[in-house]
Amino acid sequence: MTATNIIVGELGEKLAFNRLRNLGRVRIPQRKLVGDIHLDGLRIEVKAARPSKVNATKTGWQFCLRRSGHTDISNSHILILIGLSDCGDPQKVYIIPVSALRADRRKISIVIGSPTKWAHWENRFDVIESALIELEQKTMDGFDFDAVKEIAF
């Protein structure tokens, strides 16, 4: 991984962090074992890319999802892909539940200016809001309200 890749990745995380602040308690974990950003218990992996050759004739963004010793989205709830311009300005944002991806998917390539199967996930911040509700519901389902009653004031 080059210094440029690290800078692009950090830029993507900062862009996502700033956008997510309005949705809840957001933080960047000190040790990034799982997820680049945590939002009220939701683990979010952020990937950013500048344009590069996708094949001999097309330019696009290529996002590495799994690479031994470097990155792995498996334990995150949400994946945010940020396609940047050559200057680093955000052009497209895709928000995808990790559960919607094949378990063995190693990368995602998106051709700029062409129809893509990922278009369904473009600017889908509602996916994050739904995941937060679902996570809260799971937490509430496992909560022992009777135990709280016993120690109530």
Image (cartoon, rainbow, N blue to C red):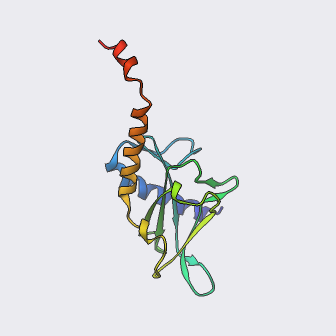
Residue 84 percent across, percent down from the top left: 47, 70
Residue at the far left: name it. 153
Question: Which quadrant of the figure contains the N terminus?
Answer: bottom right
Residue 62 percent across, percent down from the top left: 57, 70
Question: Which one is nearer the viewer's eye here, 153 or 62?
Answer: 153
Locate residue 26: give its quadrant: top left
Question: Which one is nearer the viewer's eye here, 81 or 119?
Answer: 119
Locate residue 64: give its quadrant: bottom right
Residue drawn 38% across the image and 61% down it: 124
Residue at the far bottom: name it. 57
Residue 88 in the image: above or below residue 6: below
Question: Which one is nearer the viewer's eye here, 6 or 126?
Answer: 126
Residue 33 percent across, percent down from the top left: 59, 44
Residue drawn 55% across the image and 60% down it: 101
Residue 83 in the image: above or below residue 32: below
Residue 140 in the image: above or below residue 92: above
Residue 75 percent across, percent down from the top left: 57, 47
How many numbered marks appear?
0
Question: Which quadrant of the figure contains the C terminus?
Answer: top left
Residue drawn 49% across the image and 63% down it: 81
